[in-house]
Image (spheres, rainbow, N blue to C red):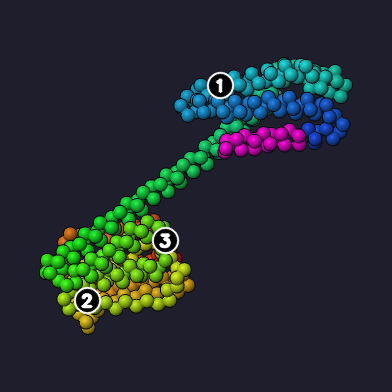
Amino acid sequence: MNKLRTAFLHVFIWIAILLLFIYVSSRNGAVKDSIVIFLYFGLVNIAIFYINYLYILPNYLNSRRYLGCTLSIILLVLFSACVKYAIASIFSEIILVQGHNQDYYVNFWEYLFIATITGTFFVFLSTAYKFTVDWFLNEKIRKSLENEKLSTELAFLRSQINPHFLFNSLNNIYSLAYQQSEKTPEAILKLSEIMRYMLEDSNEPKVPLHREIRYLKNYIELQTLRFKNGAFVDFGIKAVEDQIQIIPLILIAFVENAFKHGIVSDADHPVKIDLQVQHNLMIFEVWNLKSAQNKDNTGGIGLSNVKRRLELLYEGRYELLIDETISTYYCKLALHL
């Protein structure tokens, strides 16, 4: 359909150009002369344009046969000049006659020189058009490949999140089950709610922020079940409206790190989580004491994953601050939604 539309557009443009030239040149009354000059010779020039554009350039330039391309263009220009002279000979009284007394006829070599210049101009015009079209096409392909690469990378990053979280959560539930804790059924239920969110919502480009917050709360409650005396988390939320959206699973890594590497059982120094939104600017902060006994030697992909997703989806619209001391860990994410 696009090719047919392009063809109609080309036909319309050429017809409009020919009619314009015929109209302008026939204002002195020489309508017949104008039709002969611009119609017949216009068709030859249009043929030069498309022979070069559709045949010579694609067949020779694409295969880098530059010598063949040059020779073909020269032959095309010379042949078209001969065709034009043949047409001019038929209408010699209109085209070949020069001078006020109409006693001088343009000879073959003079006409060949003029026709060669005209043919070369249309070759140049079609070549410029060819390079312009190819440039836009290549840009479209490049952007398509970039988008495809971006989608593939984001899908890969999302696929990393689920196994990473599931691995840690199952370890926690295994510990509860091994201890025959009464909290085990509750932990399994919380995990099922979390996994439902991850499986159903995380594939969406964006989700309402309040659903992401609910997910964080479920995660905190699930992690709290690990501790006999409970975990102390101060989660403050301010000015979160229903219509505000965010990419899913972008905040969990900061909360997860607080439980993995921080002290969460100290009532005097709870993990502090603060989330607020002001004029589409979300500020998310996490502060916790660091624990030497709570190190995770398996490493992880959490923060590096989050940073990469922020670069891909919020480039130039986020600020991430991480301030780490010997005893404390603080991170702040400012995100323009």
Q: Earlier in the sequence, mark 1 or mark 2?
A: 1
Q: Quadrant of the N terminus?
A: top right
195 shown above or below 73: below
Other residues around mark 3 within 10 Å, as few (<14) / some (14–19) / many (≥20): some
Residue beneath label 3, please? 206
**Amino acid tagged 3:** Lys
**Left or right, 228 with reference to 161:** left
Instruction: Identify the mark at residue 231; answer none if there is no mark.
Output: 2
Residue beneath label 1, please? 72
**Amino acid tagged 1:** Ser
- Helix, strand, or loop for circle 2? loop
Res. 244 image quadrant:
bottom left
What is the residue that sits farthest to the bottom in this orientation? Answer: 268
Where is residue 161 drawn, in percent x and y? 29, 58
- CB of mark 1 within 8 Å of CB of mark 3? no
Give the residues in magenta: 1-21
Query: Is residue 16 one of those drawn in magenta?
Result: yes
Q: Earlier in the sequence, mark 2 or mark 3?
A: 3
Q: Nearer the viewer, residue 13 or 322?
A: 13
CA gap, disc 1 and disc 3: 56 Å
**Residue at position x 23%, y 80% in the image:** 269
